[in-house]
Amino acid sequence: MQHKPPLTIFLANPRGFCAGVERAVAIVQRALDQFGAPVYVRHEIVHNPVVVKGLEEEGAVFIDELDEAPDGRPVIFSAHGVPKSVPAEAQRRGLLYVDATCPLVSKVHLEAERHYADGRHILLIGHAGHPEIVGTLGQLPEGAITLVETIGDAETLRPSDPDRLAYITQTTLSIDDTADIIAALRRRFPDIAGPRKEDICYATTNRQNAVKEIAERCDVLLVVGASNSSNSLRLVETATRAGCPQAYLIGGQQDIDWPGLAGIGTLGLTAGASAPDFVVQEVIDACRERFDVTLEVGAAPDEDVHFKLPRILNDRAA
C-alpha cells in the first residue's frame, strides 16, 4: 500500500449556506412545485454555479433581464435585491413575480428610504457593479446615494451638506475594511447617521471570524465559492490578512492545484455563504485519496436564523 503523507484539515465553522441563501433556493424549488416548470429567475438566484445548475435541472430558467421572461409564467428576483423599477415593470406586464431578496438586504433598502425621508444624503459602502449595490442604488431617485468603495473615496468626498449624511453598507463586505471606511467617515463627518444595527450580515461576520480563528495555523487555506461571490472573495482576503501564507478560491475539488499542496502539513477549508456543503465534502474526500487526513472542526456560534418564504408560496390558492 502506498504511503500517504499526513494532512490536518482545519474545517472552518460556520461555513456554507446562510439563511438568505437557503430561503432563495427554497423559493425557486417551491415555485417549481407550485406553478410547474419553467419558472424564470432574473439573474443568478445566488452566486454559485453548482446551485444554479441544480435548479436548472429542476426546471428553472435563468435570464439577465425581465424582458426575457414570457407572459404567463412566474418570475423570481434574486437574493441580491433589485431596483424598484424591476417589480414595477413586472406589475405593468401583469407578471406573477416572487421576490427572493434576502431580508437582510431588504433591511438595508428600508434604511436607505428612512434616511432619504429624513432629508439625508446617503453614502453606500460597497463594490460598484455588484447586483446588491445595483439593487440598493435603485431604491431611490438618481443622485440620492453616493457609492463609497475605499478609504480614499471616504477621504475625498465633498458632499454638498456635510451635516446631513447617513451611511449604509453592502451586506457581504470585509468586516475590517468596512470598519476602516466607517471610521474615516465618522472622523470627517461626526454627525453622520448609521444603521441601527450593523448592515454586514451575521453570516458574513461569522464566516470571516471562523477563518480568522484558523488562518495562522494553515499552510494553505481553500475557500469553496464562486468568482462572482463577494462573501467568498472576502474570505480569501480575510485568510491572507489573518496570517495564512496562501489562500485560494476554488469552485470545487476539480480546481485544486494538487502539486501546490505537496509538502504541506495543514490545510484550512471553508465555503462562502452560497456554496453547498456537499462540495466541501467532495474536497475533503479528494484530500483523503491523496493524504492521511486528520479532520479538525472548529466550534461554531449558534446560527438559528430562519426566514419565512413569501406568502404567495405558502398560499396554495394564490
Image (spheres, helix red, strand yellow):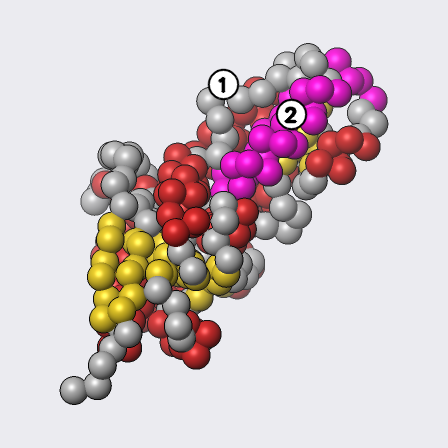
Determine if residue 162 is in view. yes
Question: Range of the magenta residues?
Answer: 160-188
Q: Is residue 183 left or right of residue 312?
A: right
Residue at image x 28%, y 77%?
Answer: 290
In the rendering, which numbered label is found on residue 183? 2
163 relative to 180, above or below: above
> Which residue is at the far left?
1
Q: Nearer the viewer, residue 190 or 18?
A: 190
Residue at image x 66%, y 47%?
Answer: 128
In the rendering, which numbered label is found on residue 159? none
Q: Is residue 151 left or right of residue 248?
A: right
> Which residue is at the far bottom?
1
Q: Quadrant of residue 289?
A: bottom left
Q: Is residue 163 magenta?
A: yes
Q: Which residue is mark 1?
A: 196
- Mark 1 residue element: loop
Q: Position of residue 155 (x, y in %)?
A: 77, 31
How many neighbours does mark 1 have within 10 angstroms: few (below 14), some (14-19), or many (20 or more)? Answer: few
Q: Is residue 43 magenta?
A: no
Mark 2 residue type: Ala
Q: Nearer the viewer, residue 60 or 221?
A: 221
The quadrant of the image that shows the N terminus is bottom left
Q: Position of residue 297 (x, y in %)?
A: 24, 50
Residue at image x 67%, y 30%?
Answer: 123
Q: Nearer the viewer, residue 195 or 150?
A: 150
Determine if residue 140 is in view. no
How many neighbours does mark 2 have within 10 angstroms: few (below 14), some (14-19), or many (20 or more)? Answer: some
- Mark 2 residue element: helix
Mark 1 residue type: Arg
